[in-house]
Image (tube, grey):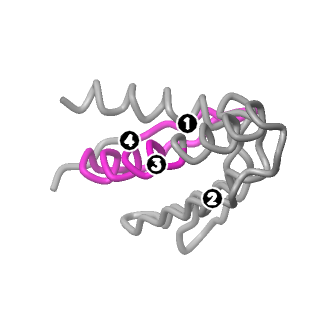
């Protein structure tokens, strides 16, 4: 399985690591489900003003040269455009935990997949 480097742009700076196109497609599918949950929460909140039914959080994990974990609770964000994810990347020597904007993460994954194909 081939790997290239995925660069994720953060609020301040960026991080790049080895990632496979297959893993990127799996992450994109998980993000697509998250977007549906975020849209359901936003639609319910804006249409009825009531409390939306709780949506399941996204927990994505990838283990390769690095361990990548992405977590997002769709119930706390008013819209998909406001949503942020908790991002953890680690290997034997370093651990990075930070927030990233969901919309930027989507753009980075799409760009990675375009270059990989």
Between tags 4 and 1, which lies in front? 1
Q: State yes or no: discs 3 and 4 in contact (Cβ < 8 Å).
A: no
Callouts 2 and 1 close, C-beta under 8 Å: no
Residue corresponding to mark 2? 55
Magenta span has 5?
no
Q: Residue at x 78, y 37 (%)?
A: 48
Q: Earlier in the sequence, mark 2 or mark 4?
A: 4
Whether 67 is drawn above or below 38: the answer is below
Comparing marks 2 and 4, which lies closer to the viewer? 2
The residue wearing badge 3 is 33
Callout 2: SS: loop
Q: Which residue is mark 4?
A: 5
Q: Which residues are magenta?
A: 6-34
Identify the residue under disc 1. 105
The CA span between labels 2 and 1 is: 20 Å
Between the C-alphas of marks 4 and 1, the distance is 14 Å
- Decide whether residue 32 is among the magenta residues: yes
Say which label, 3 or 4, has the lower sequence index: 4
């Amino acid at each position: 399985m081939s790997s290239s480097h995925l660069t994720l742009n953060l609020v301040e700076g960026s991080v790049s690591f080895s990632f496979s196109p297959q893993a990127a497609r799996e992450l994109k599918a998980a993000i697509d489900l998250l977007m549906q949950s975020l849209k359901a929460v936003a639609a319910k909140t804006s249409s009825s003003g009531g409390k939306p039914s709780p949506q399941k959080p996204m927990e994505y994990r990838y283990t390769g040269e690095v361990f990548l974990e992405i977590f997002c609770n769709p119930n706390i964000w008013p819209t998909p455009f406001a949503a942020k994810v908790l991002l953890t990347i680690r290997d034997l020597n370093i651990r990075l935990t930070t927030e990233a904007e969901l919309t930027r993460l989507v753009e980075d994954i799409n760009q990675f997949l375009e270059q990989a194909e």
